[in-house]
Image: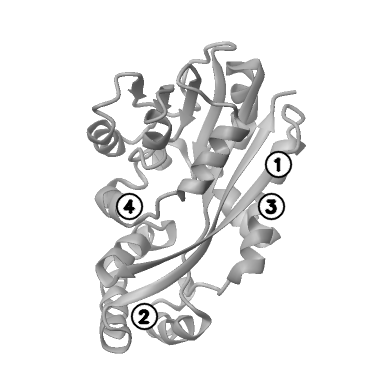
Amino acid sequence: MADSVKIFNEYSNRDLEQRKVWYTPVVEAYDRGRPRYPEALIQRAIEAAHLSPNSTILEVGCGSGIATINFAQLGCAIDAVEPNRDFCQVAARRLAAFPKVQLFQESFEEWQVQPQAYEIVLAANAWHWISSGIKYVKASQTLREDGSLVLLWNLTLEPSHEVHQVLNQIYQAYAPAIAPEYEGREKQAEIAAGLGKPVGDSGLFEPPSTEIFPCEQTYSVDRYLDYLSSGSQYVALESQVRVNLFSGLRTAIKQQFKGEIHLFNLAAFQIARKI
């Protein structure tokens, strides 16, 4: 668990200008491949945060608006901060029908704090990208006295252990350095819990409560490769290595699993009251 959380948190230490454009080559694949949040998770997050059509939300790192739209449909007023221009363009298309949503193309690090302006600061699979020395201070400053930090997570999509072993042979042949370790349900639950620990350690928020939702879905080979290509370790791969790896994975999935793959992961939400 500690190693996984450390890896997650290392993203926030990357150069800010690099973080702004990290996903630019794979924005469309990211939007196609990343799993959506289960309806039950969204409803529980809405209930736990006491959200209503009158609520005000600051979303940090909205990406392509995958989570944003769930809260926009409730009628909340949302200011969504996203530094990547291409993500902003996709999010603008997705959210065009919601006039109470405003998109700001800038990083949270550079965003000008609006003191006590929001009921909720929301981050969906984005909080680990924000500089650790800044995010809790800024979140606290912009929240009302009774406000909360809400974090949504979709952990790694995994096939069964048997399928994982088959695909691992492809990784060992083409990209052994990024061959994924099999996590399973128990470890993913530990990872989800560990991701909330820095929130309470900040001294600005209460220790968060965490709720976990098991998810299962079937991906076509194309969507699965879109999902993989949006992962940071794949973005960083040398291009020919990535081509060879994905070609091998595509062939294996088509020949041995009829062109689709059944996947499991845990989704989670965490809510922490401002102190």
Spatial separation of the CA atoms under disc 4 and disc 3: 25 Å
User: Which residue is drawn at the image coordinates 51% and 36% (left, top)?
Assistant: 123
Spatial separation of the CA atoms under disc 4 and disc 1: 28 Å
Residue 200 visible somewhere in the drawing: yes
Badge nearest the viewer, 4 or 3: 3
Taking depth in this image into account, of 122 and 204 the one nearest to the observer is: 122
- Placement of the N terminus among the 4 image quadrants: bottom right
Q: Secondary structure at mark 2?
A: helix
- What kind of residue is marked 2? Tyr
Taking depth in this image into account, of 90 and 242 the one nearest to the observer is: 90
Badge nearest the viewer, 3 or 2: 3
Percent position (x, y) of residue 86?
Answer: 26, 38
Q: Residues within 10 Å of mark 2 (few under 14, many from 20)?
A: some
Left or right: 218 in relation to 133: left
User: Which residue is drawn at the image coordinates 56% and 25% (left, top)?
Assistant: 120
Mark 3 highlights which residue? 193
Q: Residues within 10 Å of mark 1 (few under 14, many from 20)?
A: some
Badge nearest the viewer, 2 or 4: 4
Percent position (x, y) of residue 126?
Answer: 49, 42
In the rendered structure, which disc, 3 or 1, sits on the residue that comes first in sequence? 3
In the rendered structure, which disc, 3 or 2, sits on the residue that comes first in sequence? 2
- What kind of residue is marked 4? Tyr
- What kind of residue is marked 3? Ala
Residues tagged 2 and 4 counted as in contact (Cβ below 8 A):
no
Q: Is residue 30 above or below residue 140?
A: below
Residue 30 is tagged as: 4
- What kind of residue is marked 1? Ser
Spatial separation of the CA atoms under disc 1 and disc 2: 41 Å
In the rendered structure, which disc, 4 or 3, sits on the residue that comes first in sequence? 4
Badge nearest the viewer, 1 or 2: 1
Mark 2 highlights which residue? 174
Mark 1 highlights which residue? 209
